Amino acid sequence: MKKIIKIPLIIIAVILIVLLAATIIFWESISIFRSNDAVGGLITAVPENQGSLIPITYGDADWPQWRGSNDARAYVEDFVTDWSEGLEKIWEVHYLCQGAAAATWSAPVIQGQHLVVTGRRDSSEIVFCLNAQTGSLIWERAYEAPAQTSYGTGARATPVIDEDRVYTFDRSGNLHCRNLIDGRLIWKQSVNDAGGEEHIWGHSSSPLIIADKVIVNGGGSARTIAYDKRSGKIYWKSGTGFAGYAAITSMLIEDITVVVIFHGSGLAGLNAETGEELWNREWLTNSEINCTTPVISGNKIFITSSYGKGGELLEVSKSEAEVLWTGKGIASHHTDPFIIDGYIYGYSGMSVQNRGSFKCLDLLTGEEQWSSNEIGWGTGLIVNDLLFSMDIKGNLYLVRMSPEKLELLSTLPKVFGKIRGAAWTMPVVANGLAYLRFKQQLICYRIGMNR
C-alpha cells in the first residue's frame, strides 16, 4: 500500500502566496501577452464613399519612411510645448484593422497630402491612403495574404514612399509597389520565392530605398534582397540565416553607400550597389532576435538588444567593424535610441510592461550618465530638440534631455482611452501634425504650424 505524503498547510499557503504575488507583479506582462493578438474596442466600417484622387504634393517636413527622412527627427514651426489644456485633435479613424486577429503594428508614412498606412481584414492585407490633413479615405487596396496569428496577422513593417510610388512589405514577405495617386498595383514580389524565410513573428523589417533599389530583409538563403524599384527585378541577394526585425538603414563610408543590416545573428555592412558583404559582426540573442534600428554617428554604429544582452558601439570602415565597447547600460527590446552631441539616449528593458528605464550614456565610453523611470516604456522621435514619446499605454510625453538630466515638460494621458495590450507603434510627426496609432485606431493632433 502506497504511503500518502501530507504537505503541511503552511507550505501550501506559502506557495499560493508566492504565486499570487508573482501574478500581481507580472500581471501587466501577462495581460499584454494575452491581449496583443486581439483587436478590441470600437471598430468602424471602412467608408464606402472614398474621396477624390489628389495630385502628388510635397510638404516641407514630410515623413516618407521609417524614422522619416532625417533619422527620427522632425522640425515643427510654432511647436506647442504646453499641453496643460490638451492638444487639438484634427481627426481620428477606427477601421484600419477589421477582425479579432487583425492586429497591425506598422506606422503611417506621409508625403504632402497623402498618408499611407497598412491594415488587415480576415486573411487579406489592406493598404489605405488617407488625406493627411483631413483623415478622409482616398483609396484602399486589399489582397489575399494568409498569415500566422502571433501578435496579430497584420504588417509590422512601415511602408516607404518614393516620389509617385509607395512600397509595402507584409508579415508574410510580400513586397508590393503601388501608384501613390490611386493605389494601382505596379509590381509585386514575395521574398519567399527568392529563398526567403519567415522568422518567428513574421517579416518585420521596414524596406529602404537607395537610388534605384528597394532593399528588404528576406531571411533564409536570401537574408537581404535588393529589387529594382521600378520593375521589381532582383538586383542582388546577400547572406543567409534569420532576418532581423530591425529596419534597414544605410551610411556613407568614404565613397561607398553601405546598407546596414541588423540580422538575426549580428550586424552586417553591404555594398549597396553589389550586395557584397564588407563586414559582419556576430551579435547573438535568444532565438536570434534583433529588433532595434542601428543608430549611426559618423563612422560609429550603436546596436542594442534586450533579452539580457545590452549594447555595443562599433567603429566601421570599408573592410572591418571594430568593437569600441560592449555593455548592458541600454538593452532595448524594440525601441530605437538616439545619438545626440556625443551621448546615447534610449529606453532599456522589455516592451511587455510599462516599466523600464530611459537612460543617457556617454557615446565613446558607454558610461551611464543618468537613468529615469518617469516616462514608462515607449517609442518616440526628436521634435526640434525635444523627445516626443508615447508609452505602451498611450500616454504622451514631451521631454527635454541633456547629459545632466531628463526634464519632463508636458504629458497627455491615455490618447486612445483605456486599452488592452500595448501601443507599440512609433509616433510620427509631419508638417506640424502628429499621428498616433494603436491597431485599428489612427489619431491626428495638431502640434504646430501645418506648412
Image (spheres, rainbow, N blue to C red):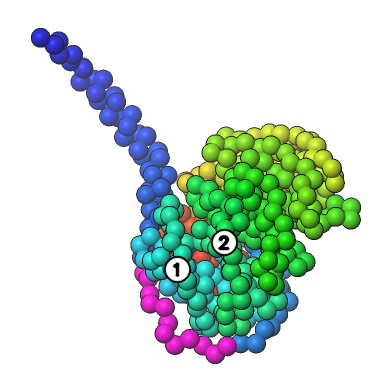
Residue 8 covered by magenta stretch: no
* Quarter where residue 177 is shown: bottom right
Q: What mark, if any, has residue 190 been given in the picture?
A: 2
Magenta-highlighted residues = 42-53
Q: In this view, does 32 lie above or below 18?
A: below
Q: Residue furthest bottom?
A: 52
Q: Residue 174 carries which label?
A: none
Which one is in front, 98 or 296? 98
Task: State whether residue 411 appears in this view.
Answer: no
Crowd rating for badge 1 (residues with CA inside 10 Å; few <14, some 14–19, many 20+)? few
Q: In this view of the protein, which residue sits in the foreground, 404 or 393?
A: 393
Residue nearer the viewer, 334 or 52:
52
Against 3, residue 184 (above or below) is below
- Alpha carbons under labels 1 and 2: distance apart: 13 Å
Q: How crowded is mark 2: few (under 14 residues within 10 Å), some or many (20 or more)?
A: some
Residue type beneath disc 2: Ser
Q: Residue at x 35, y 62 (%)?
A: 100
Q: Residue 144 carries which label?
A: 1
Residue 273 seen anywhere in this rendered image of the structure = yes
Q: Where's residue 305, x and y in %?
A: 61, 42
> Mark 1 is on which residue type?
Glu
Q: In which quarter of the image is the C terminus?
A: bottom right
Residue 48 located within the stretch drawn in magenta: yes
Where's residue 52, x and y in %?
Answer: 54, 90
| Residue at image location 78% in from the left, 50% down from the top | 276
Residue at x 42% of width, y 78% of height: 46
Q: Give the quarter of the figure containing the N terminus.
A: top left
